[in-house]
Image (cartoon, rainbow, N blue to C red):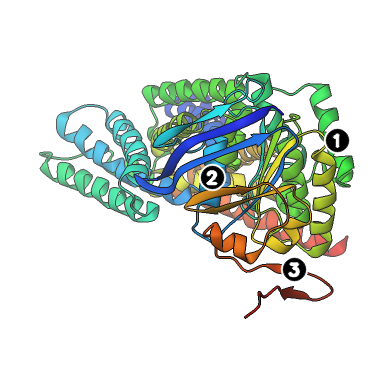
Amino acid sequence: MELLQDIAQFNFLQNAFFAAILASITCGIIGTYIVSRRLVFLSGGITHSSFGGIGLGYFLGFHPILGAAVFGVFTALGIELFVNRAELRRDSVIGIWWSLGMAIGIFFVYLTPGYTPNLMAYLFGNILTVAGIDLWLLLALLAVIILIFATFYYTILFSAFDAEYAKVLRLPVNTVNYIMIALVALTLVFNIKVVGIILVISLLTIPPSIGSLYSNSFGKIALIAIFTGMFATFSGLVGAYYFDIPSGASIIFALFLLFVVLKIIQKIYRRIS
Amino acid sequence: MNHLLTLKNVTVGYNHNPILRDVSFDVAERDFIGVIGPNGGGKTTLLKTMLGLLSPFEGKVVYAPELQKGKRIGYLPQSSRADEKFPISVEETILSGLMPKSKRIFMRRFSKQDREKVYRLLKWVGLETYGKNAIGELSGGQQQKVLLCRAIVANPELLILDEPNTYVDNKFEGELYEMLRELNERMAIVMVSHDIGTITSHVKSIACVNRSLHHHHSNRITETQLAAYDCPIQLITHGRVPHTVLEKH
């Protein structure tokens, strides 16, 4: 196996595989939350508007992902605040932040003199450019996600399912929502390097959709999502290596193919039995 | 009789627009109060105030010590509000009703006794085999039964129901009133209903809500009384054929 030798030899390939594992776990858990609460459009808005932070990072010379994290979290909380306070329609507010963030990003990238390295990696993702700091950020995020879910699992689940009833139970519904939305933003942003701003939403929606084919339990869906996510990111990575295609796209193709095949198998199985 | 909950001169509404003005109302032990009134008259606002979801602009809501800030109030929301695709089981849905009693939002798991309580209730409503199903797989009437179980699993002193008979079939409605009669032996019930004819034969007293509130301490009410309470609703009775009782005209 030429690939295995290369992995042993090249640091960037090892990073890529670690990134695939961490991305699958973080996206599996947070993705199940997003899909359950139907927050896919909100997530799209957060990811795209975080491009503003990437542009600012290039312009001012700090790590673009850190800029994106700040932009992402502020957008996420800003959308929640706007909807609650300004009484605007949720999807309109998301649309506004979505495009404003992109515009800010484009503006600063344009202002940045000279060549902007890796810009394409942020837009379309390149798991082979994932560096040590990206892995540490993902690892820290994973620790926070596990800690929060281990302590607040039922509070999160019940607040998401029926917020009004959770309020009657005096659960801290609003606090939990803000914390979860911030976690969603960080998960989206820290996974940008893996598949890119434009494609990251698929990493959060396809694996939980596969999980939903087999289970009605939040925990089991998340678990299935994590393993299908790993399988698809590994296959995508191998595909990118052998066919020399962009890794972001090949990972999405692998995820989509897996989803379609499993869905068809389920349909046939149901018809037979 | 002990008062469980008292509203004293409460003015309440949304975004500084009062819906209910100067409302005084109390619920005593073993009460079974039917809340009626026209749409937009403030029935749901009244329930939300009682549940502590809305804070009054003026006046106050006093809870009996055993109710402690609404923690021992069971609540059945209007039907068909749950997200059908949400990944939560029937068992978990009912367990959520036990969250406040534990007072531990950090709690990771429920005890064996908690689960036994859930299955005893599921048996009571005839859904004991559905514990592991997703709530979305159940029919509307079955979902209402599950949500009723969630409302009473913590043995509340007071049960509040918001139009439990909307969108469900007649068979379920009959079963529901039977269950409520049984529950009323243990807890006070406040129920909003649009169906005044049916409600009057089951409740002990009637509260008419239309921007203000009049508590009529009997389940017999006439059009004249409704008019006096400024509560313009048609009295419909369910004989063999549902019909409106018309005053002389």
Between the residue at mark 3 and the residue at mark 1, the CA separation in whole angstroms equals 37 Å
| Residue nearest the observer in this picture, B157 or A49 | B157
- Can the viewer see residue A1 in this picture? no
Q: Chain of mark 1?
A: B
Identify the mark nearer the N-term, 1 or 2.
Answer: 2
Location of the N terminus of chain B (image quadrant): top right
Q: Amino acid at mark 3?
A: Thr
Name the amino acid, label 1: Tyr
Callouts 1 and 2 in the same chain:
yes
Q: Which mark is residue A261?
A: none
Cα–Cα gap, marks 1 and 2: 32 Å
Label 3: how many residues lie within 10 Å, few (<14), some (14-19) or many (20+)? some
In this view, the residue in front, B151 or A245, is: B151
Q: Position of residue A32 (x, y in %)?
A: 58, 41
- At 34% from the left and 50% from the top, the residue drawn is A87
Say which mark, if any, is on residue B119. Answer: 1
Q: Quadrant where the C terminus of chain B lies?
A: bottom right
Residue B78 is left or right of residue B145, and the answer is left
Residue at (61%, 60%) from the top-left corner? B225
Please give the label number shown on residue B46.
Answer: 2
Is residue A104 shown above or below A155? below
Q: On what subunit does the disc labeled 2 rest?
A: B
Label 2 secondary element: helix
Q: Nearer the viewer, mark 1 or mark 2?
A: 2
What residue is disc 3 on? B237
Nearest to N terminus: mark 2 or mark 3: 2
Camera-nearest residue between B145 and A244: B145
Identify the amino acid type marked 2: Leu
